[in-house]
Image: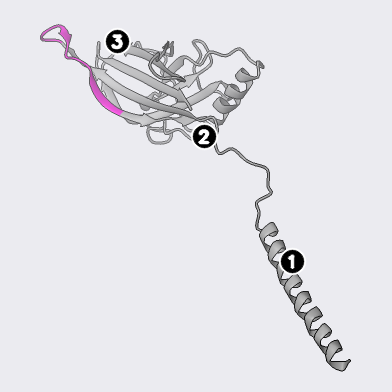
Amino acid sequence: MNKRRIYDFLLFSFLFLVMSLLLVSSFSQFSSLNLSPAVSSNGVEKNSIVCISTNAWNEETNSYEGAKLIECKHNVFYLSGRNMTRDALLGLMNATFLNISLNNVTGNATAAGMGGNPVADGSEVFITRTGCGLASVMGTGRVVPTSAGNWSITTTFTSTCDNVLTNATRITNVTGGNGTTGNGLFAGVSFSVVNLSNNDQLIINWTNSVN
């Protein structure tokens, strides 16, 4: 009888141990599962490359020498530009982001260096040119049909003065405005200083995409 009880006790202990191990293993596997809601890593991104070119006027031949690329750079998407994009998508505003302005390096020379280097909140020194054929203008917007979500905004400035310096450009939603105040700022970019003479051309080409 005692042997029988010992046998039953050992069998019970063994089964209890096996069941305990199975429960611990199942709990461990369950706790390792990722039960968080699925989050998509895809998002809407706005990208832009701004290319700056010049086309010098040759007084001897009385003709242009041909466009020469200065540089291409990524722009800074202003905080106000992001808000305007949001509001336009929600139908809260009717905006056209085509106005192109240039920084007046001469005007900034004694203020804060050359200025024009954009920051997200748009607080950089930027004195918009208003004369010499370089005042703010509405650029020409074009859809790039070969690539979904791509478009360009371009304009060509023709200087009517000599020794005109500029080093930055902005896009705003203010038709004919100076592009220097708060909520009108969409995007900006700085570039190597350009010195324009009479009849020289400055070509600004913004190529944008939404991914």
Residues 115 and 140: in front is 140
Q: Which residue is mark 1?
A: 23
x and y percentages locating residue 180 in the rendered image: 51, 23
Q: Which mark is residue 115?
A: none
User: Element under label 2?
Assistant: loop
Residue 181 seen by the camera: yes
Q: Quadrant of residue 16?
A: bottom right
Q: CA distance from mark 3 to mark 2?
A: 32 Å
Rate crowding at label 1 as few (under 14), some (14 to 19) or many (20 or more) other CA atoms within 10 Å: few
Rate crowding at label 3 as few (under 14), some (14 to 19) or many (20 or more) other CA atoms within 10 Å: some
Amino acid on which disc 3 is placed: Thr
Q: CA distance from mark 1 to mark 3?
A: 85 Å
x and y percentages locating residue 161 in the rendered image: 29, 13
Residue depth check, mark 1 versus mark 2: number of the one nearer the observer: 1
Amino acid on which disc 2 is placed: Ala
Q: Which residue is mark 2?
A: 120
First in residue order: circle 1 vs circle 2: 1
Q: Which residue is mark 3?
A: 160
Seen in the picture, residue 150 relative to 45 is either above or below; the reply is above
The residue depicted at 56 percent of the width and 31 percent of the height is: 79
Seen in the picture, residue 129 relative to 29 is either above or below; the reply is above
First in residue order: circle 1 vs circle 3: 1
